[in-house]
């Protein structure tokens, strides 16, 4: 090609319009198919108009545009509408050929038509009998007739994989040759047969499918009962009763107005099955049924009416504290203490709630025919937000590595409610993931939940505690960090578990589900070890204490507790715990073996009860769990002393997190206890001083310590703990 011709070619190409962008293949195919069908319909309409005007040759030319491009196509190659239009085109052109006297052309088109659709129905009412006769003679040369009867009539029939929509009583035309007949229906064994079809011949077949399942039929009294088959719900019965059911009422003794119509349970396999019928406020019934096939009639297996007995019960409910709202299945019933008569038995969702004092929620089973007595203590609510995995690029996802924890929580918590609302949990988890992705460095630094999310959990879910976990992607140590937050402040309790050691999750849930004790046994003695290993010495006996009442004196040496020999203060403590603990929390009296200068003697001491103060630091305690517990106890307390002990412990828990302002404002500043021995007002004064000192206010601390030093007999930790007065005196000296 010379340079001039090349330049002309490039110039011509530049003059061409730009091609439109390529369409997606699926959209292009759909558009092509629609356009093709539109063109076929237009060509067919033009051909029919010409033939109606007796322009047979013109009609044949129009139909050729439809037939010729598709004359080699099989039915499976065409869409349903394409096959319909092509069949009609063959039919119309064959009649046009017939009217022009072209018998060979007419026969050829009828033959092509029947090969495409052997069951094609020609218009026998309006066409010339000669045309109909020609069509039948062609069909006899290429197809046979299948006269088919099927039981059940609704069975699905197909030939060579093509479904047969309706069975014509005059028969089904099939092309000569081997044809695969299939008959299928749910609940029956399928039938298949290869037919040798001979042109012009009839084949008669009567096929009855063999059932492999059977329907069951139940009537329930009352109606609207749910029916389950082998543990899976299959539906509910409905009224009104049919005349046939009404006729059974006298025989089985039920009110037909309450009965259901027959309820079918279809497609049940042979053998033994368990049927359960349930309705709220009625005792459920479980039936074991044996299903046998009915090969002759395949009629439903009918059973006697299932008559449910009404199940009502009484509930007597009290709560600590009283005055809590009671909700059963979401419906408010009243305020505790409460007695509800004629309540529907069975499993019920029970919520007992009092604002600012806690709640109690469980699914309980109410036993019918008796008074159900329930005394509940309101408790904190926990929201478990889930465990999240953070990768090295800062991407966070909700992890499924927490299965051991979910399994343990799923066994039930005794001292905590659990937020279970899927909508609330999903929303909070989504917000946590967004926050982690936005600030992964803060997450790695130890902040798993920010304060805003804690406020959200409190407001939306009513949670007192929020638990969340974190793992790092590809961590060889399998570290699983759990952070327990209180909604009262942002610092968490942190527990480090391992994802490959499920027992660590079990131990954590045990700690989480242990409420801090409010009271403990009180003996009223102080003991000290000596250089001798023959028992500790009594160095303090509080006036009015159980020890004082039993005759213990300062200087006594404790040689034994019950049948146990003791050598140290620790031995005495362990022995007292072992000897006094009884089922139900009862504390039994113990016999102490004593010795003084006058000789050996015994003393029987019955323990009293004293408030307990939690330690400032104990690795086994979850201090946010304690915060939630003592806040609710302080609001629920009916006695001022109980309220004072709860506020005292609330202050100690805040001090653990160095939240000294909150410890004073919400705990020690509000706590008030009686003067006297043991945990008393002197105890409160000591902790007020200690909190003020750590807050950086020595003047206020000294004032509190001075008052505590004057509170003779007051103790720390418990009624048998160290002297609060002595501890305060030491703190005063340290401030001088």
Image (cartoon, helix red, strand yellow):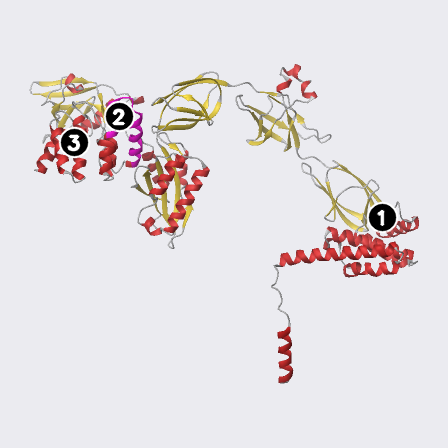
Name which of mark 2 and mark 3 comes first in the sequence. Answer: 2
Q: Is residue 249 on the magenta stretch?
A: no
Quadrant of the snapshot with the C terminus: top left
Dividing the picture into quadrants, the one containing residue 693 is top left
Task: For the N terminus, give its image quadrant.
Answer: bottom right
Q: Which residue is mark 1?
A: 122
Say if the magenta span includes residue 637. yes
Of tags 2 and 1, which is closer to the observer? 2
Which residue position holds label 3? Answer: 686
Q: Label 3 vs label 1: CA separation? A: 109 Å
Region in magenta:
624-647
Which SS type dominates the magenta stretch?
A: helix
Q: Which residue is mark 2?
A: 643
**Local secondary structure at mark 1:** loop
What percent of the width, then of the height, locates residue 361? 41, 28
In which quadrant of the rendered view does residue 696 lie? top left
């Amino acid at each position: 090609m010379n340079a001039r011709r090349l330049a002309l070619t490039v110039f011509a190409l530049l003059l061409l319009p730009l091609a439109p962008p390529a369409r997606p293949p699926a959209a292009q195919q759909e558009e092509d198919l629609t356009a093709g069908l539109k063109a076929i319909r237009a060509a067919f309409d033009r051909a029919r108009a010409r033939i109606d005007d007796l322009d047979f040759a013109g009609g044949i030319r129009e139909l050729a545009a439809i037939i010729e491009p598709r004359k080699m196509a099989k039915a499976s190659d065409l869409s349903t509408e394409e096959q319909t239009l092509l069949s009609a085109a063959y039919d119309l052109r064959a009649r046009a050929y017939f009217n022009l006297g072209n018998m060979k052309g007419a026969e050829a088109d009828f033959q092509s038509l029947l090969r495409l659709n052997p069951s094609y129905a020609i218009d026998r009412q309006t066409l010339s009998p000669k045309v109909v006769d020609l069509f039948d003679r062609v069909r006899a040369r290429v197809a046979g007739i299948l006269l088919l009867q099927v039981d059940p009539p609704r069975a699905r029939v197909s030939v060579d994989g093509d479904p047969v929509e309706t069975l014509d009583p005059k028969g089904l035309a099939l092309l000569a040759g081997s044809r695969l007949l299939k008959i299928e229906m749910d609940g029956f064994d399928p039938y298949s047969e290869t037919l040798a079809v001979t042109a012009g011949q009839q084949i008669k077949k009567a096929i009855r499918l063999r059932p492999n399942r059977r329907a069951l039929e139940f009537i329930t009294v009352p109606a609207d009962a749910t029916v389950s088959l082998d543990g899976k719900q299959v539906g509910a019965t409905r009224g009104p009763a049919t005349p046939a059911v009404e006729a059974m009422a006298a025989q089985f003794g039920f009110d037909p107005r309450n009965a259901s119509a027959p309820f079918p349970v279809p497609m049940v396999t042979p053998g033994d099955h368990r049927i359960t019928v349930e309705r709220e406020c009625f005792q459920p019934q479980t039936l074991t049924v044996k299903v046998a096939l009915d090969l002759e009639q395949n009629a439903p297996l009918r059973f006697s009416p299932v008559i449910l007995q009404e199940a009502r019960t009484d509930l007597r409910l009290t709560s600590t504290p009283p005055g809590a709202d009671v909700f059963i299945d979401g419906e408010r019933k009243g305020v505790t203490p409460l007695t509800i008569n004629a309540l529907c038995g069975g499993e019920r969702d029970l919520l007992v709630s009092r604002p600012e004092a806690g709640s109690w929620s469980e699914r309980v089973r109410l036993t019918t025919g008796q008074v159900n007595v329930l005394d509940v203590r309101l408790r904190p609510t926990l929201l478990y937000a889930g465990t999240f995995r953070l990768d090295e690029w800062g991407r966070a996802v909700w992890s499924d590595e927490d299965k051991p924890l979910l399994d343990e929580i799923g066994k039930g918590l005794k001292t905590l409610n659990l937020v279970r609302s899927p909508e609330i949990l999903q929303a909070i988890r989504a917000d946590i993931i967004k926050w982690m992705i936005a600030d992964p460095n803060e997450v790695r630094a130890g902040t798993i939940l920010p304060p805003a999310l804690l406020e959200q959990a409190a407001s939306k879910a009513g949670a007192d505690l929020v638990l969340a976990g974190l793992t790092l992607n590809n961590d060889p140590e399998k570290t699983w960090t759990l952070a327990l937050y209180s909604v009262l402040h942002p610092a968490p309790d942190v527990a480090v578990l391992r994802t490959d050691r499920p027992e660590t999750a079990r131990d954590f849930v045990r700690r989480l589900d242990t409420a801090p004790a409010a009271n403990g046994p009180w003996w009223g003695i102080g003991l000290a070890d000596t250089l001798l290993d023959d028992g500790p010495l009594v160095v303090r006996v509080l006036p009015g204490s159980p020890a004082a009442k039993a005759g213990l004196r300062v200087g006594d040496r404790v040689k034994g507790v019950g049948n146990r020999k003791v050598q140290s203060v620790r031995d005495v403590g362990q022995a007292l715990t072992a000897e006094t603990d009884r089922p139900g929390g009862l504390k039994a009296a113990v016999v102490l073996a004593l010795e003084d200068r006058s000789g050996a003697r015994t003393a029987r001491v019955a323990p009293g009860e004293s408030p307990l103060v939690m330690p400032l630091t104990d690795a086994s305690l979850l201090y946010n769990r304690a915060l939630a517990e003592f806040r609710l106890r302080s609001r629920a307390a009916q006695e001022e002393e109980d309220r004072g002990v709860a506020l005292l412990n609330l202050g100690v828990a805040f001090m653990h997190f160095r939240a000294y302002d909150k410890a004073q404002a919400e705990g020690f500043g509000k706590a008030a206890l009686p003067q006297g021995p043991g945990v008393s007002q002197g105890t409160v004064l000591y902790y007020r001083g200690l909190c003020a000192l750590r807050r950086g206010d020595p003047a206020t601390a000294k004032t509190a310590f001075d008052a505590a030093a004057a509170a003779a007999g007051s103790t720390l930790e418990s009624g048998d703990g160290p002297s609060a007065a002595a501890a305060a005196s030491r703190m005063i000296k340290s401030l001088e």
